[in-house]
Image (cartoon, rainbow, N blue to C red):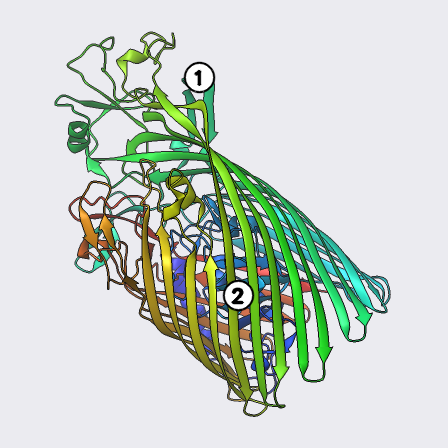
Amino acid sequence: MKKKSIFLIAATAVLYFNKAYAQETPQDSVKVSSIDQVVITGNSNPKKKIESSTAISTFSAKEIQKQNPISAAALLQRVPGFAVETSGGEVGNNLFARGIPSAGAYEFVQVQEDGLPVFEDGALQFANADNFFRVDNSVSRLEALRGGSGSIYANNSPGGLINFITKEGTNDFKGTAKLETSTYGLMRTDLNVGGALVKDKLFFNIGGFYRSDDGIRKTGFKANNGGQIRMNLKYVFDKGYVKVYYKKLDDRNTFFLPIPLTQDGDKLKGFNGFDPNYGTYSYRAISQLNIPQAGGGFFSRNLEDGIHPKVDVLGAEFKYDLGGNFSVLNKTRYTNINMNYTGIFPAGAPQTGADFAKGMGMTNYQYSMVSNGALVDPQFVQKLGFWAIDKQMNNFVNDLQFNYKFDKGNVTAGFYKSNWKSHQYWNWSNILTTATDRPELLNLVDPSLSPSSVGYSKTYNGVTDMSTLLRDSQIQGSLNDLYLNLDYNVTDALSFNGGIRYSRDFYRGYKVNTTTANLNNSGLTVDGTHGFDTTTADDHMNVLGNQFTYWYYDINKVSYTLASNYKINRENAIYARFSHGFRSPNEEAYYNNIGNLSVVKPVLTNQLEVGYKYYSRTFDIAVIPFYSALKNLSFTDVYSDGTSENKFANTTNFGVEIEGYARLFNNVFEVTFNGTIQNPKYKDFNGRNADGTTFDYSGNIVRRIPKFYFNIAPAVNITKEWRAYVSMNYYGKRFQNEGNTDDNILPSFTEFGAGMSYQLGKIRFAVDGTNIFNTIGITEGDPRSQTVAGNIRMARPIMGAAARASITLDF
């Protein structure tokens, strides 16, 4: 892999110094001019970016193609204000908007397709929004709004809106086909076609992808396998249009969790026996779980299924001109999701074989391999959570809005209705393995006892705790929101925007109580001879009872925003915006406080931002200072034993977002850049821990979020056909925990990518390299455990160096 990385760097350098410079705009130019670009997200009507009083980043289909992101999260790294963790793999990643802390996922932004949510709540337990969305060639463009008017146009989105807008057919039949391979066994096919069935009237578009790969981290099985298809049909008539669409996603992705590293001063390095760039505990040798249940039968799970959502989406959109400057727009969508989620979650750091046995109360101990029974004396062992979650989810949403245009602006009034439900079932066990990147299951016994003695074994085929946690719960939401937005042009240069949203939302759910049991009197055996009284693995098995605890919670809130934009001239503008919004309590907060929901409150947000924008044909820049204050933030990380952090705090943040693009030297040199400087801190964060100790984190830096991060991507257009680029992502130092302790520092890191492309008529050849210097870049520690042992740290690094090659045909 190092040789491949060196070759990629050398090839890029050769292209950089090639003298055959282009004298006109190259076909492969990475950036579409922003000066005339129109945006719709966070606005009542389409507006030019320079006239919109919002902080919004846009990416066309061509720009997305050039970046060729390995995941939706990787694409969102290019948006200032969004601190994105991409180390989970293709899905299951985390996004923190403008320094707002959370347990992860997309808790304070809403991910949308064509203006409606992918799922109403993007931060349900084990249901990150990117689990249900994939970027492919059917995406026309991305609009990413930070803060601002997000709370007026969507629910639970004070941090922003991420809107993926899909392609539609035109009178001209067009298509794109792409084949892609990689250094990690990738085979991917993308196809998108669109055109007119009846000229000027009836249009279609259909697209999707299928891909299979081994994963950059070595799992020993197909890490990612599946695809999606998306299609729409649009009929245009004199006074409007009607569109219907359907999406099917059936994809399976391995989710990568923390691995052990060693701390060497202010750096983290590889743990002995574990490759930090390509190693993972999610490995084939431990992929099967098959354990008896206290209530009868067996529970079986295959790690190779990973995160496996099956998503069906059916939607429609209707717009009609009512006359008299009135129009109506209605969007509706039904989403059904069935997802199996299986992952390996480390339960603390590796321990020596002696220390682990001692922790199990053993003075005499003996380890053996489950696979062949061979006796071993491992230096380090690892306790791993084998977590299995099944979720059934559905969401019906309808957004009805009326618009009235007048000489100086327009008024939009709407009613938003969303009903959604998520039912989940957890069955978690713990297993014991070698602490290596090709882990093997271990059995642990007390050799001073006979195999028929009570408590002889601490494992059952490598399982230390069988079904140690079960959870059966449901949450439902019924959202009923009215909103009003006014755009008013005071003069040709000065405009005003004001919006208000009234939310009357209802949430309810239940959980099923559990008891503990064992298999001692079940008649089952652990090895064909001895009963389960000889092992402790079944001593604390969870069993679902028949008692349900129900809960109910309602929200009655108003969100509002005020803004003004002053267009100095065609290329320069300044704006200011204040917004007040909220985020409803997250699912884990309800569950943890089901007996006293009075301690659970919506997160209240106040944000102020000002901005300067300059857009021209060759240079763009946006500089946006912002301030935010949040109340009632809940911290709900689920620990390895199934308990939750369950703490509440306030935060403040002041920062500056910078985003720009330049095309220089007669289009020979291009550079895109974005960066964020901020200072997110806790406020009024004190209380008592579960063990009775007290804490006071007020004034500390918010966990997992850097004060400074940026991305810069220069490119050289050597000829009209040849183009080469490098990219640099810098992610500043962070703290894993609220206490900001030295043993929980996540060091800063810099990741480099590089690539080249060649345009031969309508065919594009490209090579893209990621993390080409094999940087050990840590995006998060282990939020499920703060346990440390000596200089061992549990953390989740970015993927190691990899390269992809693709051929794209536009027709």
* Residue 230 position in % (x across, y down): 68, 52
Q: Of the numbered discs in the image, which one, if any, rests on residue 130?
A: none
Q: Can residue 67 be seen in this view?
A: no
* Residue 505 position in % (x across, y down): 54, 51
Quadrant location of the C terminus in the rendered image: bottom right
Q: Is residue 750 above or below residue 409?
A: above
Q: Of the numbered discs in the image, which one, if any, rests on residue 295?
A: 1
Residue corresponding to mark 2: 150
Q: Report the Cα–Cα distance between label 2 and label 1.
A: 48 Å
Callout 2, which amino acid? Gly
Q: Is residue 463 above or below residue 524?
A: below
Callout 1, which amino acid? Gly
463 left or right, relative to 12: left
Q: Which residue is drawn at 32% across and 66% down?
A: 680
Query: Is disc 1 placed on a helix, strand or loop?
Result: loop
Badge 1 density bin: few <14, some 14–19, many ≥20, Cα 10 Å: few
- Could you say which quadrant of the image residue 207 lies in? bottom right
